[in-house]
Image: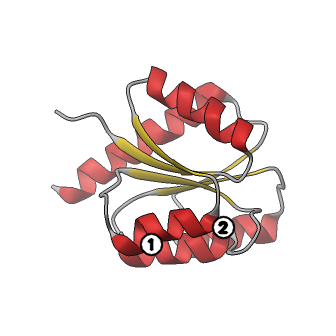
């Protein structure tokens, strides 16, 4: 079975690099995008089929909510995990209503982060069969 593929979107290059390294360590294939425009190009072009999409919310240009909407429209069966440094109930509710699988706040607990990805992958497998 092929390793799960993750699209990781975060405008903070250090966060993008460290999370990519962590996810690679756990056996995931990671496509990283340091801005929402590059992420939109990945999704809009459907160049890749991702098993999970992880996106930051606060990004310049197209924000994470707009990206979440496009991602769910293009890949409705792919879980999207939102990560952000700002925990606000209205933002959490909006992200979940737009189809986010989970909403995690930074700084991330890496074990919780990986567990959330695993749950998302298993939930997808169950709904596809």
Describe the element under mark 2 as helix, strand or loop: helix
Find the distance from the CA under tag 2 to the CA under tag 1.
12 Å
Q: Image quadrant for the N terminus?
A: top left
Q: Is residue 73 above or below residue 120?
A: below
Q: Read off the residue under disc 1.
A: 72
Mark 1 or mark 2, which is nearer the start of the sequence?
Answer: 2
Q: Is residue 78 left or right of residue 55?
A: left
Q: Nearer the viewer, mark 2 or mark 1?
A: 2
Q: Is residue 47 left or right of residue 105?
A: left
Residue at coordinates 41% horizontally, 75% vertically from top-left?
44
Residue 120's spot in the image, x, y percent? 42, 47
Residue 128's spot in the image, x, y percent? 21, 58
Describe the element under mark 1 as helix, strand or loop: helix
Residue at coordinates 63% horizontally, 53% vertically from top-left?
34
Residue at coordinates 42% horizontally, 68% vertically from top-left?
43
Q: Residues within 10 Å of mark 1 (few under 14, many from 20)?
A: some
Query: Which colour style is shown?
Result: secondary structure
Give yes or no for contact between labels 2 and 1 (Cβ–Cβ under 8 Å): no
Q: Is residue 43 left or right of residue 54?
A: left
Residue 109's spot in the image, x, y percent? 69, 30
Closest to the observer, 118 or 27: 27
Residue at coordinates 25% horizontally, 50% vertically from top-left?
126
Q: Read off the residue under disc 2.
A: 64
Q: Residues within 10 Å of mark 2 (few under 14, many from 20)?
A: many
Q: Is residue 120 above or below residue 36?
A: above
Q: Image quadrant for the C terminus?
A: bottom left
């Amino acid at each position: 079975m092929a390793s799960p593929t993750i699209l990781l979107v975060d405008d903070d290059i250090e966060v993008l690099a460290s999370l990519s390294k962590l996810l690679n360590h756990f056996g995931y294939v990671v496509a990283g995008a340091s801005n929402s425009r590059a992420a939109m190009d990945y999704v809009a072009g459907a160049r890749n089929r991702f098993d999970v999409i992880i996106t930051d919310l606060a990004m310049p240009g197209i924000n994470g909510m707009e990206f979440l909407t496009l991602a769910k429209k293009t890949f409705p069966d792919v879980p999207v995990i939102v990560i952000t440094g700002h925990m606000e109930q209205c933002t959490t509710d909006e992200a979940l209503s737009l189809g986010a699988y989970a909403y995690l706040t930074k700084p991330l607990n890496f074990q919780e982060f990986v567990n959330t990805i695993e749950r998302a992958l298993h939930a997808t497998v169950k709904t596809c069969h």
